[in-house]
Every structure is written in structure tokens, then in C-alpha cells.
Image: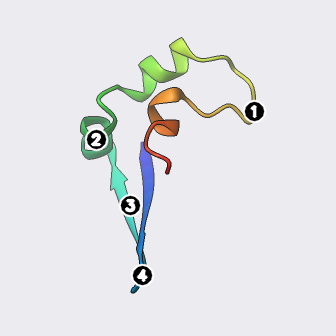
Amino acid sequence: YKYVVIARDNTGDTTFILFGKTAQRHLRKSVETMIEENPPEKDFIPDEIMALVE
């Protein structure tokens, strides 16, 4: 899958795009597992992703 990370500090921001196995290693869970463990609501964001948001 594709996982977009935006990093920001006082000098600006940049976007990192992680794909497939790299994204899976970063989130420590496969996309299949996240789909199985979370409700099928359109706007739902899994806890694993929300934990990364500051």
C-alpha cells in the first residue's frame, strides 16, 4: 500500500511516500490486518495511523 508522511519544522515541510513492505514495516502491521481489525466506515482512520499524528 501507499503511506504518505508529511514532516514539518520551522524551516518548512516535506512529503515522504512509503510503499508496500516499507510502509508495512513502519506501521508494524499489514494492510490486510488493519482492514480486518477495523470497521468498514468510509472515514475511519486506524489507531496505528492516528498514533503517528501530532
Q: Position of residue 41 (x, y in %)?
A: 74, 25
Q: Quadrant of residue 46?
A: top right
Q: In what element is the residue under mark 4?
A: loop
> Closer to the camera: disc 3 or disc 2?
2
Identify the mark nearer the N-term, 1 or 2.
2
Q: Disc 1 marks which residue?
A: 42
Q: Quadrant of residue 28?
A: top left
Q: In what element is the residue under mark 2?
A: helix
Q: Check disc 2: other Cα within 10 Å, few if <14, some if 14-19, many if 20+.
A: few
Residue at 69% from the left image edge and 20% from the top image edge = 40
Q: In what element is the residue under mark 1?
A: loop
From mark 1 to mark 4, how far is it between C-alphas?
A: 34 Å
Q: Disc 3 marks which residue?
A: 17
> Closer to the camera: disc 1 or disc 2?
2
In this rendering, position of residue 41 left or right of residue 28 = right
Q: Position of residue 5 (x, y in %)?
A: 42, 58
Q: In what element is the residue under mark 3?
A: strand
Amino acid carrying label 3: it is Ile
Q: Quadrant of residue 24?
A: top left
Residue at 24% from the left image edge and 37% from the top image edge = 25
In this rendering, position of residue 11 left or right of residue 38 = left
